[in-house]
Amino acid sequence: MSAEVIIKSNMYQDSVALMRISSQISKLPGIIQAAVVMGTPQNKNILEESGLFKPELMAAKPSDLIIVFDAEDPASGRKAIKLVDKLLESPEPGSKSTVKADRNSVSIRTAIQAHPEVNMIAISVPGEFAAAEALKALKSNANVFLFSDNVSIADEVQLKKYAWSKDLILMGPDCGTAYIDEVPFGFVNRVRRGNIGIVGSSGTGIQELMTQIHRLGGGISHVIGTGSHDLSDDVAGLSTKSAIIALEADEATETIVLVSKPASKTVMEHILEALARTGKKLIACLQGFALEKDYGNIQFANTLQQAACLAVNTTVKPPVCDFADVRVQGKFIRGLFSGGTLASEAYMLLGKEVGPVAFNIADPWHSEYHGHFILDMGSDEFTVGKPHPIIDLNDRLSMFKKVAADKETGVILMDLVLGFSAHEDPASELAPYIRQFCGTNGPKVVINLLGTELDFQGYDSQASKLLEAGAIVLNNNSDAVFTALQLVAGAGKGGE
């Protein structure tokens, strides 16, 4: 085994780009483990926990790029170094998932000087530096898409108050999705242009909405993500309020859809009151919110699919496939999700039908509870020091093998997310596992394939690969959940 450490001084790289590079290096033959990260203290701690930390990394500064891997032999190490250099120099050949800049800038100040017309700046730096960079962008009179996480609540509140005072929007921190004038930011799908605007504190929830609206014949004007903490008591929905005001003023937007994971009840009530005062058609899909009073012309949806149907003036239709004659041996549904909002929606829908459902338990087989469970494998506890599962399927595939080997598993319920920044060909990675571990006597695999025919991965091509492997493929989350329920109905219910 050959250990290799490379430090490239003062070479900052975007975290999403580094996630993708780490994923590709790890898949090379002869590479046991690999990481490509910035030299922040947090990343050094992660490397130490993973067994990749080497003494020479002590000298690395936060602005330095760290490349570290264990290889089976020197030749494999040389191939890894060559690929890292190639990927750092340019995006992956043939990739349509990235937007290439016309020139490089070493700071926000020089970027603004080169492009004074810019009114939106995307920031993806380590959390300890993110607040300072966001403040620079706001002071330059630019709206901010802040992908970075690990920003303190105090900094978030300060930044959002400042943005509010300047009639700007700070999307984030920890904002995964935005689509402004058909320009993608973070994880997002390509959809047709239209008159429906979306505001949300959830990433994949937004993606599910916009793809369903597209599938139903509607179109999107703008998508404004607000960050996962925006609707907390501390932040008080400052970015959500700004987004509603912006969409209200936008002539192209005739309908506003608000989507949220569980949030502060007090903050959500204030947001709904503000939303109800707008003159647009209004729809809200709010997970965990108990409606206790009337909010004028706001229509409330119980699922993301229903919200999309309301936005385009149609009704929810049941799944077209009938699986009444299909029987599974196991009686439990096990969900392996990459999207937090989709995982949360599945958890709530299942809970209403089958009783107790465990959510994000650390070890489903060594806990006091053993039954139905949902894992959000894109949450912090699963992604520290690792690429997000929308980018890299490795962790989900490892869990897939464990779940499939449990004879009590009747259905493996999953999402597979297409679009910008997502895996180039996720179906090709998942399909062999379905064939190998879910044969005649194995569990059924039910997949919500999230995307559109405009996404660069090719929706129909991805669906075909999954269907050929034996999966059941649905085009929305709620249909996938109810299909899973139908499949286990004959095997028994319960979580005992």
Image (tube, helix red, strand yellow):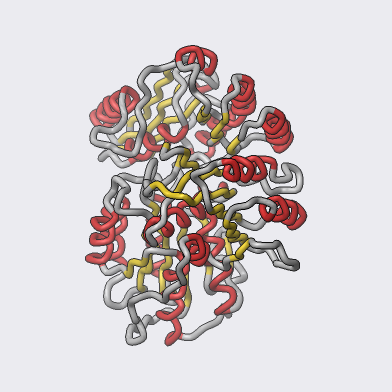
Q: In this view, does 333 lie to the left or right of 72?
A: right
86 left or right of 212? left
Nearer-the-camera pick, 371 or 391: 391
Quarter-of-image position of residue 11: top left
Could you tell me residue 307's position as x and y percent?
52, 63
Q: Which residue is drawn at 45% across and 29% down?
A: 14
- Most foreground residue, 409 or 166: 166
- Relative to 223, residue 406 above or below: below
- Camera-side residue: 142 or 407? 142
Q: Where is residue 455 in the image (x, y as percent from the top left)?
A: 32, 48
The quadrant holding residue 465 is bottom left
Q: Where is the N terminus found, in terms of image quarters?
A: top left
Image point 56% across, 65% down: which residue? 366
Q: Quadrant of the C terminus?
A: bottom right
324 horizontally vs 64: left or right: left
**At 40% across and 17% down in the image, what residue appears?**
104
How far across and how far down the image is residue 198, in percent? 53, 50
Locate residue 341, reporting x and y percent.
Answer: 54, 57
Quarter location, residue 32: top left
Is 278 situated above or below 436? above
Q: Can residue 416 be seen in this view?
A: no
409 or 227, nearer to the observer = 227
Residue at 31 percent across and 68 percent down: it is 471
